[in-house]
Amino acid sequence: MKEHPIQASGYFDILTDEYALTVASGSLAVTFDFLTKKDVKHLISCLSGMLYDDNTESDDEQREADLGDPGS
């Protein structure tokens, strides 16, 4: 069975203040439109929570700092 890499793309619409995210692999593609900044932060939190390891305390603190400063 051939493995298909996951590809992701997204954008922010400055006029509507909304985000969109598309995730694709092989012949499957899913698009999430009309996302708010709060929605995107929730998705980031969800995905980050899935990456559990023994150093979660310092990782969690870093993720929170990164969410507060999008330029980092």
Image (cartoon, helix red, strand yellow):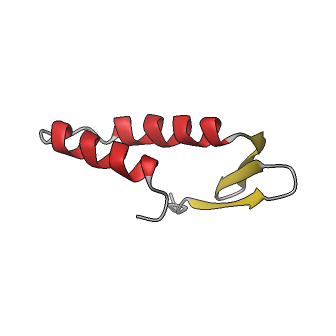
Which residue is rendered at x = 63% and y = 36% of the image? Answer: 39
Which residue is rendered at x = 87% and y = 56% of the image? Answer: 15
Q: Is residue 28 above or below residue 51?
A: below
Judged from this view, the residue extending furthest toward the left is 54
Q: Nearer the viewer, residue 66 or 56?
A: 66
Q: Is residue 47 left or right of residue 22?
A: left
Q: Nearer the viewer, residue 21 or 23?
A: 21
Residue 6: image location, x then y, percent:
55, 59
Quarter of image, res 43: top right
Which residue is rendered at x = 13% and y = 42% of the image? Answer: 55
**Quarter in which the C terminus is drawn:** bottom left
Residue 37: image location, x then y, percent:
64, 42
Q: Is residue 72 left or right of residue 18?
A: left
Quarter of image, res 9: bottom right
Q: Is residue 61 left or right of residue 33?
A: left
Judged from this view, the residue extending furthest toward the front is 69
Quarter of image, res 69: bottom left
Q: Is residue 67 left or right of residue 19?
A: left
Q: How many marks?
A: 0
Residue 70: image location, x then y, percent:
49, 58
Which residue is rendered at x = 38% and y = 42% of the image? Answer: 48
